[in-house]
Amino acid sequence: DAQGQLFGVVVINADFAELLRSAGFDPTEGNRVHVLTDSGDHMSFGADAAPATLQFHEDAGWAPSPFAAAVASGAGRTDLARVAGSAVRSASIVASRAEAPLTLNLLVETPLTAIHAAARAALLRTAVVSAVLVLLVWVVAQNVAARLPIARLAAALRDAGSAVGFDLTSLPDDETREVALAFSRMSNDLLCQTLRAGAVFESVPDGVVTIDADGRIESANPAMTQLFGYSEAELIGAPVGMLMPDAIAARHPGFVDGATELSGRQVMAANRDIRGRRKDGSLVPLEISVSRFHFGGANHFVGVLRDITERREAEAETAALVAALRRSNEELDKYAFVASHDLKAPLRVIDNVSSWLEEDLEPVLTDDTRDSLAMLRNRVRRMERLLDDLLIHSRIGRTEERAVRISGTELAETLRDLVDLPPAMELEISPQFSGIEIPNMPITTILLNLVNNAIKHHDRPDGRIMLDVNETVGGYEFTVTDDGPGIPPRYHARIFEMFQTLRPRDEVDGSGLGLAIVRKHAEVAGGRIEVASDGGRGTRFTLFWPHDPAPALPTGRAA
């Protein structure tokens, strides 16, 4: 019921004998099949016509089966058992469970007399057949021995030694020769594989060693002996701990025991310092790969050892160079700080003094002296711009600029507001800008620099500058195209260098750092800047700007 209480039993009465007969019990002549339960019920089937009758343990006149004790003890479960003059084999075909508390056992009985009779008959037949076969084999052997000199084959194999290939031309051309040739090919293949494996083992530049489950060395290649300074004879059979510092050697047996679960290749010393001990006691840094294999019924391990002395030295040298570069960057920071502050102070004094002199000496100044004073102040302003541009260039990639995402339309409006466009000059911005959204810095600085550069270097008062953008896989492609004088191809690389101008500085007012700043911004962000011009009219600068620019790496104070 719902509370788990038994309130009734359904009993099904079946013809047990008929059920078992329908299961296909068909004993052969001389055998009998017995079915027994753990309650003592049993019935027997034989090859005779006598019907099988169930012997139920609660019936009157019931007697236990003579095989009940044998079945209960498990006799005949794994091999034939002898019970009461018969050979029996038993098996449990239904096991007792909580929901079915019944064990059903099956036992096959064969009288020993029947077995012995069959064995004697088989032995007689076998003896006769064996005698005939021995006689036949002797006759065939004599005939074959007369036609095939097996000694020649043995001699050919002995003469071959470790060489690849057997000379079997002296053997007769028959089936035996085919067998010999097949054996020869198989032997050659095995020999080639063995020689190839040996050659690889001997020629590997890294040390290779195999050890057994007890941690003793089984084999070592020449690179291993050269690495540690031991001879092969000294290594074979020695504990592998002799190649380790004492502290590691003491713990190594535990490593070997734990490595029984090792599967595949395991690399050691990838991120930590592991050292081996040479015969002379010196230590050598190593990278070790260990793997396990099963052979001959036991676990074995193979280790590949690589001397990483040169790598460690290179890492130390790299660390020293990085430290030197860091010191150099710090010195550049200090220089930029001095250039942006300390050097500007005397420039301002020079500018002020020149203005005062011009005012005080106005009555006696000539046109030449006025031009000289104007040139002086011009040079001062150029020097200030140069210092400002140097400071900007040094900060690129070293300080994080505050940027907000703006639409392309806002970017276009910002550029129009910041560009000092001459009255006769035209700036055309593509409608494609309305379809993008991008951080405003430093892309605003870059595009403004490129547009101003096109205006500054134009050779006519009127001109046309076109600004376009296209979204590509991974980023945006901005183009700034002008109809100015163009740039000869031989100068395309030079214009991106610091302090480089194609026209005299008195003709073009600039520091020579504009395009260098543009290129550094692009490279730091993971983009690139290219120029296209054949030296005739017009120049096109193409800037590829990634969707996800690389972040700046602040190094502390920047000037």
Image: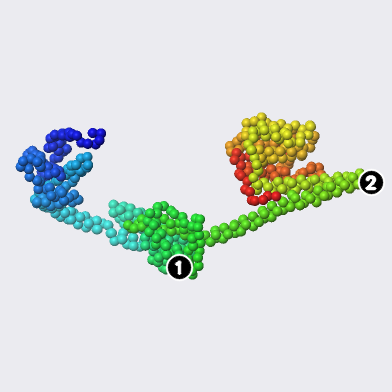
**Left or right side of 117 for 487:** right
Q: Measuring 64% from the left and 57% from the top, which residue is drawn there?
A: 324
Name the residue that disc number 1 marks: 230
The residue carrying pointer 1 sits among few (fewer than 14), some (14 to 19) or many (20 or more) residues within 10 Å by Cα, namely: some
Q: Looking at this view, is 125 or 464 the one in front?
A: 464
Helix, strand or loop at mark 2: helix
Quick check: 214 above or below 60?
below
Q: Position of residue 27 (x, y in %)?
A: 13, 42
Mark 2 nearby-residue class (10 Å; few <14, some 14–19, many ≥20): few
Q: Residue at x 76, y 47 (%)?
A: 386
Q: For residue 46, what is the image quadrant?
A: top left
Count of labels in the image: 2
- In this image, 385 relative to 167: left or right? right
Residue 205 lies, in percent from the top left, at 48, 59
Which quadrant is the N terminus positioned in?
A: top left
Q: Earlier in the sequence, mark 2 or mark 1?
A: 1
Q: Amino acid at mark 2?
A: Val
Q: Determine whether 265 is above or below 45 in the image.
A: below
Q: Is residue 472 visible?
A: yes
Q: Residue at x 13, y 40 (%)?
A: 26
Q: Which residue, given by chain and number where applicable, does mark 2 sit on? A: 364
Residue in front for this viewpoint, 383 or 511:
383
Question: Relative to the observer, which residue lies in front, 75 or 334?
Answer: 334
Residue 182 located left or right of residue 139: right
Outermost residue, left side? 61
Q: Secondary structure at mark 1?
A: loop
In the image, residue 207 above or below residue 463: below
Q: Amino acid at mark 1?
A: Tyr
> Gap in Å between the C-alphas at discs 2 and 1?
97 Å
